[in-house]
């Protein structure tokens, strides 16, 4: 189970990194960054469906040392979020280390152990196969929908003042539109992560990635679909992934498959892409 947890955490760390980019708190790794490097995936008509750039190109302000107050604020945020009940979403006002009196939206994804439960929850919005290449069978999934981000800011401030608590929460509601779906497939001691994200409305169709210069990437075509193949060497393993964007149920969706070892290679990319095509 350690492997599953490690791979799941990878994606939620990526989610947390995106928050840091949004508030301009990605630490500067090096002062000199000359080459502008990016990768694009295009449709058969030439439309850019996906563009990947290094996080240094995001325009976010970088800092050499983390701000202690913001670091404490974020740690409290992660603590609260990690203890929320699965399938809940709330507007949260954290009192300490919050001079700007920010109210943040926190979520706890729905958690499922059977494919049938996932399909019942998402309906026709997405297709999930029972198995992936290499006899990997569905193991579990986390998912979230869009958020109806409607809350009473003044009421939260008043509640915090009245109750003298570190933080106060106001429950929010989900929409019916799938935001992301992270799944794990297993075959013996081998695990694969299949992650699907709603890519509609992403600004510039651009995703910012940390340590892009340390990753080996190549665009590969599977039929009319362009797929980005990535290898990243770690201390004890090499992570391999493929990513592509295609339309499903009228929406642009991003697909990502992540594996270690020899489960995924340039030679079998088409097997994974084709596995995501509903059987007619």
Image (tube, rainbow, N blue to C red):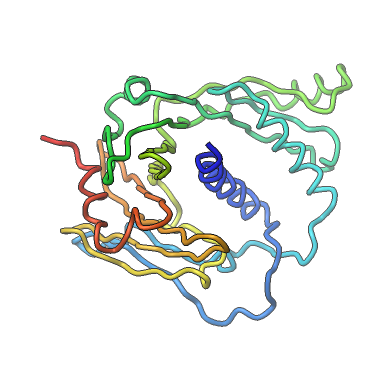
Instruction: Spot the residue most to the left.
Output: 280
Q: Residue 151: image x %, image y %?
A: 64, 24
Q: Residue 194: image x %, image y %?
A: 38, 43
Q: What's the residue at 61%, 52% (across, down)?
A: 17
Q: What's the residue at 31%, 60% (across, down)?
A: 265
Please identify the quarter of the rendering in which residue 58 is found. bottom right
Between 172 and 67, the one lying in front of the other is: 67
Q: Residue 83: image x %, image y %?
A: 68, 26
Between 78 and 59, the one lying in front of the other is: 78
Vertical comparison of 192 with 160: above or below: below
> In this rendering, would 87 be left or right of 178?
right
> In this rendering, would 127 be left or right of 108?
left
Between 183 and 106, the one lying in front of the other is: 183
Marks counted in the figure total 0
Q: Residue 179: image x %, image y %?
A: 44, 36
Vertical comparison of 85 with 259: above or below: above
> In this rendering, would 25 be left or right of 44?
right
Instruction: Spot the residue most to the front.
Output: 188
Vertical comparison of 87 with 198: above or below: above
> In this rendering, would 128 be left or right of 191?
left
Q: What's the residue at 60%, 79% (across, down)?
A: 33
């Amino acid at each position: 189970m350690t492997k599953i947890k490690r791979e799941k955490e990878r994606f939620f760390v990526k989610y947390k990194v995106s928050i840091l980019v949004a508030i301009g708190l990605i630490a500067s790794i090096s002062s000199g960054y000359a080459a502008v490097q990016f990768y694009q995936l295009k449709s058969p008509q030439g439309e850019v469906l996906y563009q990947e750039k290094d996080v240094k190109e995001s325009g976010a302000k970088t800092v050499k040392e983390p701000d202690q107050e913001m670091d404490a604020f974020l740690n409290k945020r992660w603590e609260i979020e990690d203890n929320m009940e699965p399938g809940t979403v709330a507007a949260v006002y954290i009192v300490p280390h919050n001079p700007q009196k920010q109210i943040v939206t926190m979520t706890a994804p729905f958690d499922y152990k059977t494919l049938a439960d996932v399909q019942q929850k998402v309906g026709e919005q997405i297709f999930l196969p029972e198995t992936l290449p290499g006899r990997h069978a569905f193991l579990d999934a986390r998912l979230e929908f869009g958020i109806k981000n409607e809350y009473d800011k003044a009421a939260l401030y008043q509640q915090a003042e009245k109750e003298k608590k570190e933080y106060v929460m106001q429950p929010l509601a989900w929409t019916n539109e799938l935001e992301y779906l992270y799944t794990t497939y297993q075959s013996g001691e081998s695990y694969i992560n299949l992650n699907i994200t709603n890519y509609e409305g992403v600004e510039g169709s651009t995703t910012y990635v940390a340590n892009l210069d340390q990753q080996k990437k190549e665009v590969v075509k599977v039929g009319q679909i362009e797929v980005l193949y990535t290898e990243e060497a770690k201390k004890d393993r090499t992570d391999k992934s493929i990513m592509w964007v295609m339309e499903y149920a009228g929406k642009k969706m991003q697909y990502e498959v992540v594996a270690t070892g020899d489960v995924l290679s340039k030679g079998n990319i088409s097997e994974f892409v084709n596995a995501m095509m509903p059987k007619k």
